[in-house]
Image (spheres, rainbow, N blue to C red):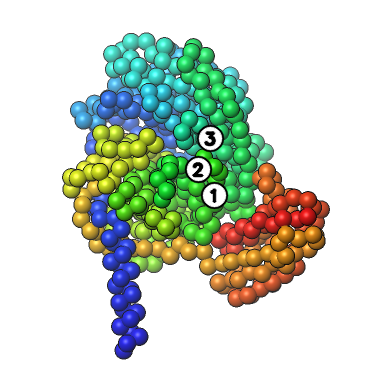
Amino acid sequence: MKLLYTLLFLGLTNVIFSQSTFDYQVQLNPISIANFPGIHSYAFGQSNGKWLIIGGRVDGIHARQPFNAFPSSNNNTTIYVVDVVTNQFWSTSINVLPTALKEQLQASNFNFYQDENALYIIGGYAFSATANDHITFNKMTSINVSGLINSVVNGTSILPHFKQMTDANFAITGGQLGKINNTFYLIGGHRFDGRYNPMNNPTFTQTYSNQIRKFSIDNSGTQLSIYNYEAITDAVHLHRRDYNLLPQIFPDGSQGYTISSGVFQINVDLPFLYPVDIKPEGYFPQTSFNQYLSNYHSAKSCLYDATENRMHNLFFGGISQYYYNGTTLVQDNNVPFVNTISRTTRFANGALQEYQLPETMPALKGASAEFIPNKSLPHYSNEVIKLSEITTDEFVIGHIVGGLTSPSANPFSVNNTSTTSANATIYEVKLIRNAPLGVQPIEGKNPFSMSVSPNPTDSSTVRINFKMAYATNIDYFVSTMDGKIVLDGEIEDTTRGDNSMNFELDGISNQTVIITFIFDNKFYVSQKVIVK
């Protein structure tokens, strides 16, 4: 009876702990603006309470057939300005712009970031009449946000509010753009030229960035330019696109970012599950933790509680390899649309924990949507909301705008993409101070481990010991410190529990390499090895 009591007490403590880490309920309130269209995969900026929306698409998820994927007729060629307070919007066509501008600004899956009054848009993918093909644009455009908003509202010329430059390093789509201190970070993504083809037939070329591209921008004159360009490469951990980039306040108070999930792993067409932290001093894969409930780009909001030193990240719907059916966590490798609202929290000791919230999206929505934050709330320069400085019990943290909506979980895998559409309903997102019931903590710990000996080594053969939580497949990669993969393969005939093997580092000498084991296509373990 004593043992039973202890287990019950620990279980109750865990439930209380999971619920008390974030004392808010989430409420979504639909807002309908007459004639405002559905749109997804766009870029946005905001000024004086008005939103600026550029690019993206007005159809549903892309078709499987190359001839029917990403038709230019469904590019968004309209600039929108939205006032959500008065429920009205204004619009103008981009067709008055020079060819290079109007072609890029009707693309989708940009990398974009608003720095004060300048909105920077990099890359994006769409049909280019100039190239007579679908391309990833090698452009960066800067937009005077307040000036463009005023011109759209007042019906005056929009031409003065744009600058554009060309650089091959900007030919990226599906990545994310951020800024730490005075340095911009173009993170992940890929260059994709040609027609999409799910069978990998030669209708396109694709090159993952595998990089964090760092640079400064000079926007002071009439000509846009960059300087201090630097690229950091990692073909294993940075092989990501279509993910959520989370602005963060880390436990030491510093600002940075976290790459949340994303696709696709090198060895299998499934999402990454572990995050990667990005700081001025480098990037740090967090392979001891997996996030299950949000894998693709979706609406998200980031809030920091300075009193408790807790960083909270909210994810709204989207597309995920995992979802809950009641209390059962379901794995679906078709990676379906989900209605899940989830949260990850980073605690003062750096530990990460994921939670399913009891609230859900009103339908299978949220994928390729944007969360436009309420800038009237106290916030950091990277737009993380200062949660502990908000004293009211109910407050609007922002709005979910656009995105995809689907009547079924897996329309893509059954070739039913025509049933999907771009969402036209805007959702006001409110937090209500109240300890929520039904919060589900999720076990995200990596149960696999690996060690290498001797390390350093003067031999081409090392001994690897690894512990397996269960018998499963193992893929491995050996990469150099400059991010290039030099060896890869599979390991067979392993068993649950302790395993050991001789591992050949053929042709490797006088350098440090990183050995990465991937267990069950979901758990990564990396070890640096010095080879003399």
Q: Using the image, determine if residue 490 lies above or below residue 41.
A: below
Is 67 or 184 nearer to us in this picture? Answer: 184
Residue depicted at 66% across the width and 73% down the height = 499
- Tell me the residue that label 2 is attached to: 279
Query: In the orientation shown, which residue stands out farthest toward the bottom?
Result: 1
Q: Earlier in the sequence, mark 2 or mark 3?
A: 3
- Tell me the residue that label 1 is attached to: 284
Label 1 packing within 10 angstroms: few (<14), some (14-19), many (20+): few
- Tell me the residue that label 3 is attached to: 186
Q: Which percent across, then down, holds residue 16? A: 28, 66
Q: Are marks 1 and 2 in contact (CB under 8 Å)?
A: yes
Q: Are marks 1 and 3 in contact (CB under 8 Å)?
A: no
Q: Which percent across, then down, holds residue 531? A: 75, 55
Residue type marked 1: Phe
Q: Using the image, determine if residue 407 lies above or below residue 425.
A: below
> Closer to the camera: disc 2 or disc 3?
2
Residue type marked 2: Lys
Secondary element at tag 2: strand
Q: Tell me the CA gap for discs 2 and 3.
A: 13 Å
